[in-house]
């Protein structure tokens, strides 16, 4: 291809002919850089650049294109820049804001910190811990071990905990009276946790399921979950927990009107400072399976679809949010998390209250399983997931990864 033309070029160009790059006629039509000399002949155009810039790809690096190769420059799709490199006429180049980790950090929109986490802890009234096979890395703690775990998490910046009890079958009834036993496992755990970490924020779950012989979040009659009768129990449970030092009451039962009733109960007993984190949009999800393994709280019959939301519905979450807000909730929660990022986002746009997301047991277990198989990088996927919750609009994230993620954030200097 070179031949005669290259010979002629060598007369006007200081560089050896073999280093010349065939370029498109289109370059000339777009306008030659003034510093460049051009030669046009026999239907082939060439430019010779007086400057050799090391930042520009050297012509020697470019293999000759076989005949018939599509030429973006000849087709006027690309221009040539002053260095005879291809130039997409693009002023706005978002990659500039990604060019180094420090630049990326400077423009980063969302960060996740240990202060955003709530660490769920499973407890039971036994002296030894029990591993939870479907939730690798989690265990059902003795009360002493729960305190030790909370203290360990505390040193990495975790400040907030939520406790979930496994209750022996012999204490379970349809009306779940054990839920408000002042000597029950939850009030004892609360006392120990607050004594060990007085500045911690302890959340307590309000629902009947750990105490229900029927395995439901409410009282069962004729196969139905009773709403108002259940709320009477939940109010007793919430007041008992407040008396024992709970900082945040977290009703996870999904009965209608429970937030308002619990708020009034707390206020009438003088607990105006005790907060309510409502499980606002809690879906009837299959992702809770491992949690129910952990607490042995699988529904005794049927499912929870008459009180938890249909996963197919988004607008319903907005109705729930409006109600919980009017009834006096301090924090609105969406649960599960990852498959419901759209709901987190929609809630965030409609409320000025803080929004929490529950990265639930099934989501945790899926990740752990893939990690165990060597298919995912645990640290990267975990931190990405938690960041995505924040980007979607979650102020707070309940996650079984709370301690581990805080450790990673510190180790990697990401705080
Ligand atoms: C029970 C409750 C559940 C979870 C939190 N509180 C399970 C359920 O509704 O059956 C699930 C949490 C998880 O899966 O991590 N009221």
Image: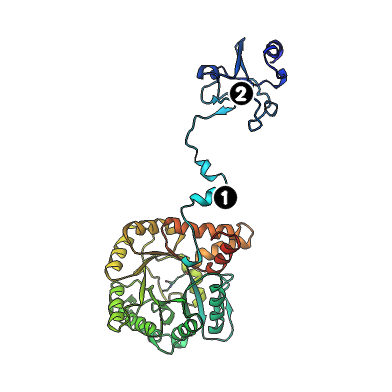
Q: CA distance from mark 1 to mark 2?
A: 38 Å
Q: Which residue is mark 2?
A: 69
User: For the residues carrying marks 1 and 2, which lies nearer the camera in this image?
Assistant: 1
Query: Where is residue 301 shown, x and y percent of the image?
Result: 41, 75
Between 22 and 128, the one nearer to me in the picture? 22
Q: How many marks?
A: 2
As displayed, is residue 163 above or below residue 367? below
Q: Residue at x 57, y 64 (%)?
A: 410
Residue count near mark 1 (Cα–Cα under 10 Å), binned few <14, some 14–19, many ≥20: few
Sequence-wise, which precedes: disc 1 or disc 2? 2
Between 2 and 37, the one nearer to me in the picture? 37
Query: Where is residue 406 shown, x and y percent of the image?
Result: 55, 66
Q: Residue at x 52, y 41 (%)?
A: 96
For the question of whether residue 216 can be seen, the reply is no
Q: Which mark is residue 264?
A: none
SS for dot 2: loop
SS for dot 1: helix
In the figure, is residue 185 to the left or right of 207?
right
As displayed, is residue 68 above or below residue 346? above
As displayed, is residue 42 above or below residue 94? above
Quadrant where the image shows the N terminus: top right
Q: Residue at x 66, y 26 (%)?
A: 52
The image quarter in which residue 183 lies: bottom left
Q: Is mark 2 within 8 Å of ligand 1?
A: no
Residue count near mark 2 (Cα–Cα under 10 Å), binned few <14, some 14–19, many ≥20: few
Q: Which residue is mark 1?
A: 101
- Quadrant of picture, ligand 1: bottom left
Q: Residue furthest bottom?
A: 183
The image quarter in which residue 213 lies: bottom left
Query: Where is residue 217 shown, x and y percent of the image?
Result: 38, 76
Query: Where is residue 221 shown, x and y percent of the image?
Result: 32, 80
């Amino acid at each position: 291809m070179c031949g005669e033309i290259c010979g002629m070029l060598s007369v006007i160009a200081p560089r050896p002919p073999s280093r010349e790059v065939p370029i498109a006629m289109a370059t000339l039509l777009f306008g030659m850089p003034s510093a460049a000399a051009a030669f046009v002949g026999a239907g082939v155009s060439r430019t010779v650049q007086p400057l050799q810039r090391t930042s520009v790809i050297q012509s020697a690096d470019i293999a000759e294109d076989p005949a018939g190769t599509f030429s973006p420059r000849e087709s006027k799709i690309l221009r040539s820049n002053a260095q005879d490199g291809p130039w997409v006429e693009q002023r706005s180049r978002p990659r500039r804001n990604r060019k180094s980790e420090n630049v990326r950090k400077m423009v980063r929109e969302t960060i996740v910190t240990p202060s955003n986490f709530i660490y769920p802890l499973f407890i039971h009234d036994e002296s030894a811990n029990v591993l939870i096979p479907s939730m690798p890395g989690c265990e059902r703690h003795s009360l002493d071990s729960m305190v030790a775990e909370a203290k360990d998490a505390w040193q990495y910046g975790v400040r907030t905990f939520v406790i979930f009890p496994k209750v022996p079958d012999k204490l379970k009834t349809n009306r779940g009276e054990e839920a408000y036993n002042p000597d029950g496992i939850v009030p004892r755990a609360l006392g120990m946790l607050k004594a060990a970490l007085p500045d911690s924020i302890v959340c307590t779950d309000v629902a009947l399921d750990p105490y229900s012989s029927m395995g439901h979040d409410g009282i069962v009659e004729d196969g139905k979950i009773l709403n108002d009768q259940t709320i009477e129990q939940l109010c007793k449970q919430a007041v008992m927990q407040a008396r024992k030092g709970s900082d945040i009451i977290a009703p996870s039962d999904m009965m209608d009107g429970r937030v308002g009733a619990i708020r009034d109960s707390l206020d009438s007993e003088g607990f105006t400072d005790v907060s309510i984190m409502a499980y606002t949009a809690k879906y009837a999800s299959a992702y809770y399976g491992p949690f129910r393994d952990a607490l042995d709280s699988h529904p005794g019959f049927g499912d929870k679809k008459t009180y938890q939301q249909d996963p197919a519905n988004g607008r319903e979450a907005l109705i729930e949010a409006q109600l919980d807000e009017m009834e006096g909730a301090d924090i609105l929660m969406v649960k599960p998390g990852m498959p419901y990022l759209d709901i987190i986002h929609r809630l965030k746009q409609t409320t000025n209250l803080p929004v929490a997301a529950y990265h639930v047991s099934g989501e945790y277990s899926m990740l752990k399983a893939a990690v165990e198989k060597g298919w995912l990088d645990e640290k990267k996927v975990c931190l990405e997931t938690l960041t995505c919750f924040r980007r979607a609009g979650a102020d707070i994230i309940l996650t079984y990864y709370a301690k581990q993620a805080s450790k990673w954030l510190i180790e990697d200097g990401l705080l």
